[in-house]
Image: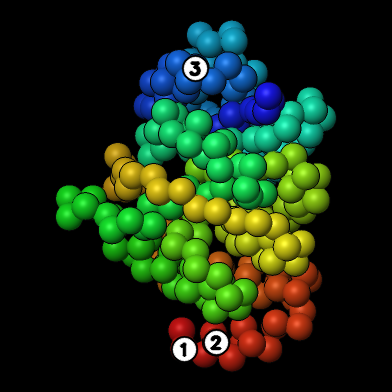
Amino acid sequence: MLRFLTAIPVHNEEKYIAAVLRQTLEVVPDVLVVDDGSTDRTAQILARFPQVRVVRHERNLGYGAALATAFRFAVDANYDAVVTMDCDGQHQPGLIPRLLRSLPDADIVSGSRYLRPPPPDAHIPPERRRINQLITNLINDLFGWELTDAFCGFKAYRRSVLEQLVVTEPGYAMPIEVWVQAAHHGWRIREEPVPVIYLDQTRAFGGALDDPEKRLAHYLDVLKASVQRWVPNLLDRLLEREVVF
């Protein structure tokens, strides 16, 4: 039987964390929360869930850094796989078994909010959808893939992936590194449909990344750096494709 860990990175999630943990524990037994330097009541709420393992960053290091901590924890604890999910109500714990069922045929199973047409009332923040689509299209063009959602945080990873994955991007651009290294290593990718849920339309990325154009520019910089490191033969193609932006 596959031994897996569900890992949830959190930063100031006092509004959602109790409900997310209750729902998750109804589905899976092993849950890790990486508290990425929360300054609200997140730590006090976590104390109500002694069955949940917690690793705390003393200061906020970023989404990618929190996932890197979770991946190291899982490898050190000899888990066969890790499921990652966000703590803002976007991801439904009841879908975890669906992701895991696809792992025998994949190295990474990635949730996709756009594999099926979103319902008319989805209320997707337009700038997030635009940037997601632009980066997804670029990745597909580079690697000959047919991804539909480059930034969904609801994923299942095989241990073999975690042992090879190098996370250098501490923030929200970290998934870009995953895709580039997947192309480099030849990891098998599969997408599974997940609902589009945005409970908080005003959630911030932090600092300059709250500006959509600066966020897109940052994502492109991370993509170029990652391509140059892992698949440098594709860098010229990326630079040519970037002109259309």
Q: Are marks 2 and 1 in contact (CB under 8 Å)?
A: yes
Q: Is residue 60 visible?
A: no
Q: Is residue 94 visible?
A: yes
Give how far across and how far down residue 196 sits, in percent: 32, 47
Q: Which residue is mark 3?
A: 25
Give how far across and how far down residue 173 sits, in percent: 58, 58
Cα separation between marks 2 and 3: 44 Å
On the rendered structure, is 66 left or right of 162?
left
Give how far across and how far down residue 225 sits, in percent: 70, 72
Q: Which mark is residue 244?
A: 1
Q: Amino acid at mark 1?
A: Val
SS for tag 2? helix
Q: Is residue 85 above or below residue 237?
A: above
Cα separation between marks 1 and 3: 46 Å
Asked whether 138 or 221 is in front, the reply is: 138
Q: Residue at x 59, y 29 (%)?
A: 6
SS for tag 1? loop
Q: Residue at x 58, y 16 (%)?
A: 29
Q: Residue at x 38, y 57 (%)?
A: 115
**Callout in the foreground (1, 3):** 3
Quadrant that contains the N terminus:
top right
Q: Amino acid at mark 3?
A: Leu
Q: Which mark is residue 15?
A: none
Give how far across and how far down residue 12 sits, in percent: 48, 32
Image quadrant in which you'd find residue 114: bottom left
Sooner in the amino-acid sequence: mark 1 or mark 3: 3
Sooner in the amino-acid sequence: mark 2 or mark 3: 3
Image quadrant in which you'd find residue 22: top left
Cα separation between marks 2 and 1: 6 Å
Q: Mark 2: few, some, or many residues within 10 Å (few <14, many ≥20)?
A: few
Q: Is residue 18 above or below residue 142?
A: above
Q: Which residue is mark 2?
A: 241
